Image (cartoon, rainbow, N blue to C red):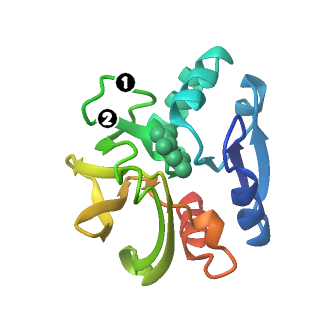
């Protein structure tokens, strides 16, 4: 199984460690040519969504990546990655790949609660550790989107077809649980 990990900016190394540990082959996606190889899935890591969106455009990767996701390429999107997938951003006309009918609020926890760690139920996976870093949350989901996790009344994980969007960073807690990456690899099969 070959997984492409977007490696333009942000926390991509940790995803590569997690997926490699689970037996997947990972390739870093840094330029258009990297997207042209056969991939079974793609990871959009956390970081800064504005920067990632800009780089995707500058490198000519934006439309090819968007097409692949629309055609059903499985995606694991964490934090900034989730912002890239969102069809709408709350109080913001910016849109990036916009392949998932969710409305996402950026930096939703404000300054004081910018970063925190908790544990909550995630779909059928049971309780998993959740590390939030200047995290967004999902304000609303559109038709066909399944809510997978709610923390303090806010949706923090959802799935739309084979697109999995998480507000938190499972790649930072792989010493405690690899359940999220295992679940993603099952989606890629
Ligand atoms: N605040 C970042 C953004 O808006 C996301 C933070 C993260 O990925 N840890 O893009």
Taking the spot 36% from the left edge, 61% from the top edge, the residue there is: 156
The residue to which callout 1 is attached is 94
Q: Position of residue 5 (x, y in %)?
A: 69, 46
- Asked whether the residues under the numbered discs 2 and 1 touch, taking CB atoms below 8 Å apart as contact, a structural biologist would say yes
Res 44 quadrant in image: top right
Q: Secondary structure at mark 2?
A: strand
Q: Is residue 57 above or below residue 174?
A: above
Taking the spot 49% from the left edge, 79% from the top edge, the residue there is: 128
Q: Is residue 32 visible?
A: yes
Q: Position of residue 93 (x, y in %)?
A: 30, 23
Quote the CA–CA distance across marks 2 and 1.
Answer: 7 Å
The residue to which callout 2 is attached is 89
Q: Is residue 23 above or below residue 119?
A: above
Q: Quadrant of the N terminus?
A: bottom right
Q: Is residue 95 left or right of residue 73?
A: left
Q: Is residue 60 left or right of residue 69?
A: right
Q: Is mark 1 within 8 Å of ligand 1?
A: no
Q: Position of residue 143 (x, y in %)?
A: 20, 48
Q: Position of residue 94 (x, y in %)?
A: 37, 24
As rendered, which of 65 and 95 lies closer to the eye?
Answer: 95
Q: Is residue 72 visible?
A: no
Q: Rate crowding at label 2 as few (under 14), some (14 to 19) or many (20 or more) other CA atoms within 10 Å.
A: many
């Amino acid at each position: 199984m070959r997984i492409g990990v977007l490696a333009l900016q942000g926390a991509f190394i940790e995803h590569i460690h997690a997926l490699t540990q689970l037996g997947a082959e990972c390739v870093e996606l840094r330029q258009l040519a990297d997207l042209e190889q056969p991939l079974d899935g793609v990871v959009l890591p956390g970081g800064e969504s504005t920067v990632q969106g800009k780089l995707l455009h500058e490198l000519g990767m934006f439309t090819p990546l968007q097409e692949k996701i629309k055609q059903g390429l499985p995606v694991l999107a964490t934090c900034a990655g989730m912002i890239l997938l969102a069809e709408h951003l709350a109080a913001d006309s910016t849109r990036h790949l916009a392949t998932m009918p969710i409305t996402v609020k950026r930096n939703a926890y404000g300054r004081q609660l910018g970063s925190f760690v908790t544990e909550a139920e995630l779909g059928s996976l049971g309780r998993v550790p959740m590390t939030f870093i200047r995290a967004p949350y999902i304000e609303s989901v559109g038709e066909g989107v399944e809510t997978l996790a709610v923390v303090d009344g806010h949706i923090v994980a959802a799935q739309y077809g084979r697109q999995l969007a998480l507000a938190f960073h499972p790649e930072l807690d792989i010493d405690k649980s690899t359940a999220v990456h295992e679940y993603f690899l099952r989606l890629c099969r």
